[in-house]
Amino acid sequence: MPPPAPRKLWFDGGCRPNPGRMEIAVVTGGRTWIVPDCGVGDSNRAEWLALLGAIDLARQLGETDVVLCGDSAFVIDQIAGRTAAHPATADCLAAYRNGLVSFSRVRLRHVGRAQNLAGIALEYRRAGLAPPQPLADQQGLRLFPRMA
């Protein structure tokens, strides 16, 4: 019997204005988790928090083999070592690396904005077009430590 396929998770974070109130979304298995208020920060930190949220969610779902899909070159390039870690988000990079210990395999994929299901979910929510879905906090999920 072949091993199960890896779990794909799409992540996206943003804030409006930038800097401002951060929000994140994670999509997997046809479900969307949204945290509408992650504190105040900039769009780069919001992207990092979304990635950390995806890792936390994958762990909570019992996954060990994951593909993390996001549109943030800022985050993905730092993880891949193509750019130096940014001092303002060095704590996030460390949290990412520490979070990998519970997984047998993790792959990152840079996807275009139009293919990022989590980004689409955030845009629909901002436009008031998203169907009502439970927010991550209402489902008792702890996607990441809240930022001030």
Image (cartoon, rainbow, N blue to C red):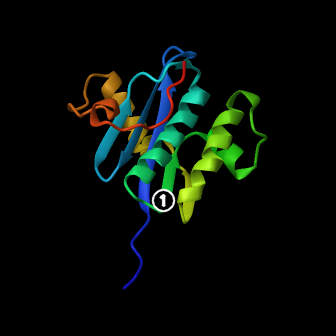
Is residue 59 left or right of 104 when viewed as pictured?
left
Is residue 79 left or right of 135 when viewed as pictured?
right
Badge 1, how many Cα within 10 Å: few under 14, some, many 20+?
many
The residue at the point 59 percent across, 54 percent down is 100
Q: Which residue carries the number 1 mark?
A: 66
Is residue 46 left or right of 85 when viewed as pictured?
left
The residue at the point 28 percent across, 50 percent down is 30
Residue at the far left in the pictured view: 132
Q: Quadrant of the N terminus?
A: bottom left
Residue 121 image point, x, y percent = 35, 35
Q: Nearer the viewer, residue 142 or 132?
A: 142
Q: Quadrant of residue 105?
A: bottom right
Q: Nearer the viewer, residue 62 or 82?
A: 62
Q: Quadrant of the C terminus?
A: top right
Residue 19 image point, x, y percent = 58, 16
Q: Is residue 127 visible?
A: yes
Residue at the far right in the pictured view: 84
Q: Is residue 111 visible?
A: no
The residue at the point 47 percent across, 62 percent down is 64
Asked if residue 125 is positioned above or below residue 96 in the image, the reply reads above
Asked if residue 3 is positioned above or below residue 7 in the image, the reply reads below
Q: How many marks?
A: 1
Label 1 SS: strand
Residue 25 image point, x, y percent = 41, 36
Asked if residue 121 is positioned above or below residue 15 in the image, the reply reads below
Residue at the far bottom in the pictured view: 1
The residue at the point 21 percent across, 32 percent down is 131
Q: Quadrant of residue 5?
A: bottom left
Q: Quadrant of residue 88?
A: top right
Type of amino acid under label 1:
Val
Is residue 144 left or right of 93 when viewed as pictured?
left
